[in-house]
Image: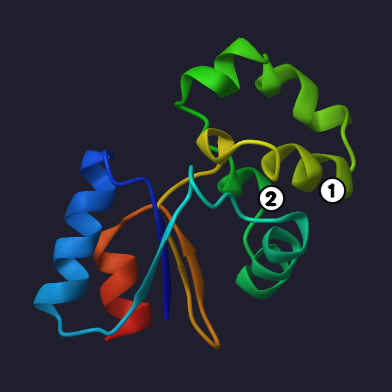
């Protein structure tokens, strides 16, 4: 299982602690030092069955600076994925990627249902 996170994010720290407490094995990927590629994001998005907007860090400064709330509806999926691939701070975190599950953000109930 891949755990994509930003080490200084408090939600990511809680998610990592939850994974460890539940004895789930994972590989870490720092979203800023090793930003997901277009190909990775596209694969995760397709596997997740989530709306693409769930992959955006909508509460982040970068999202607001770029006024993405207004721009995203006019962008194609590929354009949105390309934008996400340019900056890890635009990407919702943490992300869990396993063989059959992709989760964005940390919601304990959802993680319990999908990962335990």
- The one nearer the camera, 10 or 45, is 10
Residue 25 quadrant: bottom left
Q: Residue at x 14, y 81 (%)?
A: 22
Check disc 1 and report the residue beneath it: 77
User: The N terminus is located in which quarter?
Assistant: bottom left
- As helix, strand or loop, the secondary structure at mark 2 comes to helix
Residue 92 drawn at (x, y percent): 49, 44
Q: Which residue is at the far front?
A: 33
Q: Residues within 10 Å of mark 2 (few under 14, many from 20)?
A: some
Q: Is residue 113 above or below residue 111?
A: below
Seen from the viewer's position, the closer of residues 50 and 42 is 42
Residue 2: % across, % down: 44, 73
Please give the name of the residue rendered at 70% of the width and 38% of the height, measured from the top-left corner: 86
In the displayed structure, does residue 93 sit left or right of residue 56? Answer: left
Mark 1 Cα shell of 10 Å, populated few (<14), some (14-19), many (≥20):
some
Q: For the residues labelled 2 and 1, say whether their Cβ atoms are less than 8 Å apart.
A: yes
In this rendering, the answer to whether 111 lies above or below 86 is below
Q: CA distance from mark 2 to mark 1?
A: 8 Å
Vertical order, 109 against 55 (above or below): below
Which percent across, then down, holds residue 69?
66, 22
Residue 67 spot, x, y in % from top left: 67, 14
Q: Mark 2 highlights which residue? A: 52
Q: Secondary structure at mark 1?
A: helix
């Amino acid at each position: 299982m891949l755990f994509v996170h930003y080490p200084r994010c408090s939600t990511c720290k809680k998610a990592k602690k939850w994974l460890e407490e539940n004895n789930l094995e994972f590989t870490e990927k720092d979203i800023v030092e090793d930003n997901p590629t277009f190909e990775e994001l596209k694969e995760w998005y397709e596997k997740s069955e989530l709306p693409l907007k769930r992959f955006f860090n909508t509460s982040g400064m970068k999202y607001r600076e770029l006024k993405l709330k207004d721009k995203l509806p006019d962008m194609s999926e590929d354009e949105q994925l390309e934008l996400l691939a340019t900056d890890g701070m635009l990407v919702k975190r943490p992300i869990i990627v396993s063989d059959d599950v992709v989760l964005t953000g940390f919601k304990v109930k959802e993680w319990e249902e999908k990962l335990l």
